[in-house]
Image (tube, helix red, strand yellow):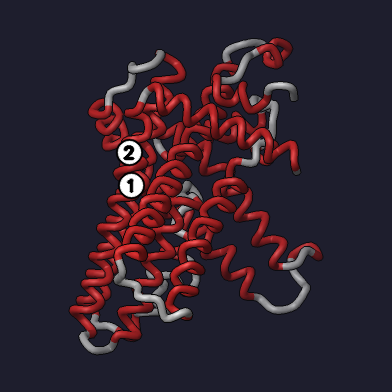
Amino acid sequence: MFDSIGRGFRLIWASIKMGWHDKRLMVPSIITVMANIFFAILLFLQAKTQFGGKSEVATKMMHQGQSLFQQGANGAHGLTGMPGMAGLNGAMDPTGMGSMMSQDNAMAVTGILCVWWLTNRFLEGVTTALVYSHLTEGKGSGRFGAAASAVFTSLPAIIMLGLVTLIAKRIAGWLRGKQGAGGMFGFGFSFLAGIIEVFWTLAGHMILPAIVIEGTSFWGAMKRADRIAQGNLLTIGVGEVGVDVICKITSAVVYAVGVGGFGLAYYAQMSLTSPAMMITGVIWAALVLVITALSIYIRSAFYTCLYVWAITAEEVEEALRAEIAPPAPLAAALAGR
């Protein structure tokens, strides 16, 4: 556990240094955060316009928007799909908000959420392409326009990835909703749901680079990811580098400190509009934006490093694969392993 956390910190530091030396690598993640804010505001305005005085409905939709914003930090923005958007009781769950709005408004909200998700995945793909160019061709080799063009041509495969991810998440949610300890082959339903979520999370992180880097279809990327898994082309498990754990804990701490601090100030009847409180709020908001953008970038860099390492190892005989050095950030994380 502690070794994993230590490797995670080393990879994070190496990824930050890589981004500092080639600042374009972090641009898509910064744009992602700005886009998340824009879509959250748009979603709130849509709810407020539709429901007017029914502030509790608008508040519920804004909370769902905030949960989507946090997916950018937890990955989710990662590639786990649309857990906050399309999971049970999520913003796109037809059993949730659907009965509380008109058909036209439901379509508008669904459209906003779909464009939001697609924007995040598009920018994640651009980050993947830029990091790949940096790792394989050197600093400054990646071009934002070329990376965006490559991702744009891969949008059908990315959309298919999202649809399959939605189905996998729905199945996992359905299994978790089952009561009782029984399940298939004696396994509990919650256990089976966990297997689906873990498998698809790991598979998805290999599928997106295959789609973006190699320009393959969704099914071609699925086969590519399967060859990487079946061929033992990665000599480490994802859990051996605790990047996800560190990002989630750091984000949670930053959110909790801010919310707790403002809650305490409100309880103490301090003026939230005082200069000191407003400056504190701006600093906290800036810290949230930085942490969120870094989390998105670091996850993309990590999984792109894994993919580059796997396809490099694939080019040599199996007996020589242990001698293939991982990309620099991953090598820094595994130093002394």
In the figure, 70 relative to 262: above or below? above
Please name whichever residue, 85 or 62, is drawn nearer the observer in this view of the structure: 62
For the residue marked with disc 2, what is the amino acid? Pro
Q: Residues within 10 Å of mark 1 (few under 14, many from 20)?
A: many
In the picture, measured across the screen, residue 220 lies left or right of residue 119, that is: right
Q: Is residue 211 above or below residue 308?
A: below
Question: Circles 1 and 2: CB distance less than 8 Å?
Answer: yes
Disc 2 on helix, strand or loop? helix
> To which quarter of the image does residue 157 belong?
top left
Q: Amino acid at mark 1?
A: Thr
Q: Residue at x 27, y 37 (%)?
A: 152
x and y percentages locating residue 315 in the rendered image: 57, 13
The answer to whether residue 5 is visible is yes
Dot label at residue 32: 1
Query: What residue is rendered at 62% in x and 75% in y?
Result: 177
**Mark 2, residue position:** 28
